Image (tube, rainbow, N blue to C red):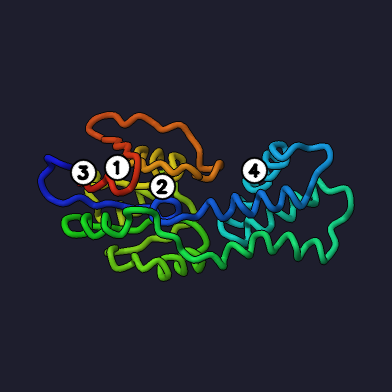
Amino acid sequence: MTGQKGSQTLLIDADDTLWENNIYFERAIAKFISFLNHHEFTPAQVREVLNDVERECIVKHGYGLESFARALVDTFEKLAVDPITPKLHSKILRFAHDIAGHPVEILAGVPETLVHLAQQHRLMLVTKGDLLEQAGKIERSGLKKYFLSIEIVAEKNEATYRAIAAKYELDADSTWMVGNSPKSDINPAIAAGLHAAFVPHGNTWILEHEELVHARPPQRLLVVDQFAELRKYF
């Protein structure tokens, strides 16, 4: 940060930090709820059921489109009166699989900010999810060149950040996790002894919502309105 000597190591999240991601899932969910057209459950109640089913699918199948597709099918089976037919099954799967066709939409200010940060600091991309899906988005984004290394992990928790810090021999005093998710980016990084920079996104996935923890000195928690603001601090 400004006033500190030497460069910093910035671990940077990808989905909804560098590019749009959750908005496509939200649109798919809206289509699914409309298609289900439940006569007893409100859309909000259907969404609550889906959230619970998604949590179960993540435990069993991890993150990614296939897990999301399973969650939609399982939710339909829980709530629909009639049994699911092969035709219905294919229709529901399309809600999820259509997401794969979206181009990678880079968020405002990201490329020029990465150029600025990479001039002085060590940038590492740390993202969670399906290996092939995340690797594909990274390649299509055109942002890979700014990062010295890339870590695609199954989950982001305290143990993950400690393992990454040990693998790359990172100094906690000069290492920051940058991301939009309190649950996956900020709180576990703070728990692992790192600094963190929170870049909120208006459409952060509901399962990533969590109250931000307080960083106790000498740890630091930086909160900015948008990614481009990082240029003021690093």
Q: Earlier in the sequence, mark 1 or mark 4?
A: 4
The N terminus, quarter of image: top left
For the residue pair 164 and 87, the one nearer the viewer reads as 87
Look at label 1 and name its amino acid. Leu
Task: Give the crowd class for mark 1: few <14, some 14-19, many >=20 residues within 10 Å.
Answer: many
Q: Which of marks 1 and 4 is in front?
A: 4
Q: Which residue is drawn at 45% across and 66% down?
A: 137
Q: Distance between the residues labelled 3 and 1?
A: 20 Å
Q: Residue at x 76, y 52 (%)?
A: 35
Residue 73 x %, y %: 74, 55
Q: Distance between the residues labelled 1 and 4?
A: 30 Å
Q: Earlier in the sequence, mark 1 or mark 2?
A: 2
Q: Which residue is drawn at 72% across and 48% down?
A: 33
Which residue has dot 4 on it?
51
**Residue 220 horizontal side relative to residue 190, left or right:** left
Task: Give the crowd class for mark 3: few <14, some 14-19, many >=20 residues within 10 Å.
Answer: few
Residue 56 to residue 190: above or below: below
Which residue has dot 2 on it?
159
Q: Earlier in the sequence, mark 4 or mark 2?
A: 4
Look at label 2 and name its amino acid. Ala
Task: Give the crowd class for mark 2: few <14, some 14-19, many >=20 residues within 10 Å.
Answer: some
Q: Distance between the residues labelled 3 and 2?
A: 30 Å
Q: Distance between the residues labelled 4 and 2?
A: 25 Å
Look at label 3 and name its amino acid. Lys
Residue 43 x %, y %: 72, 40
**Residue 65 horizontal side relative to residue 121, left or right:** right
Q: Which residue is drawn at 72% across and 37% down?
A: 45
Residue 101 position by quadrant: bottom right
Find numbered disc 4 in the image and state the secondary structure of the residue it sits on.
Answer: helix
Residue 133 x %, y %: 51, 66
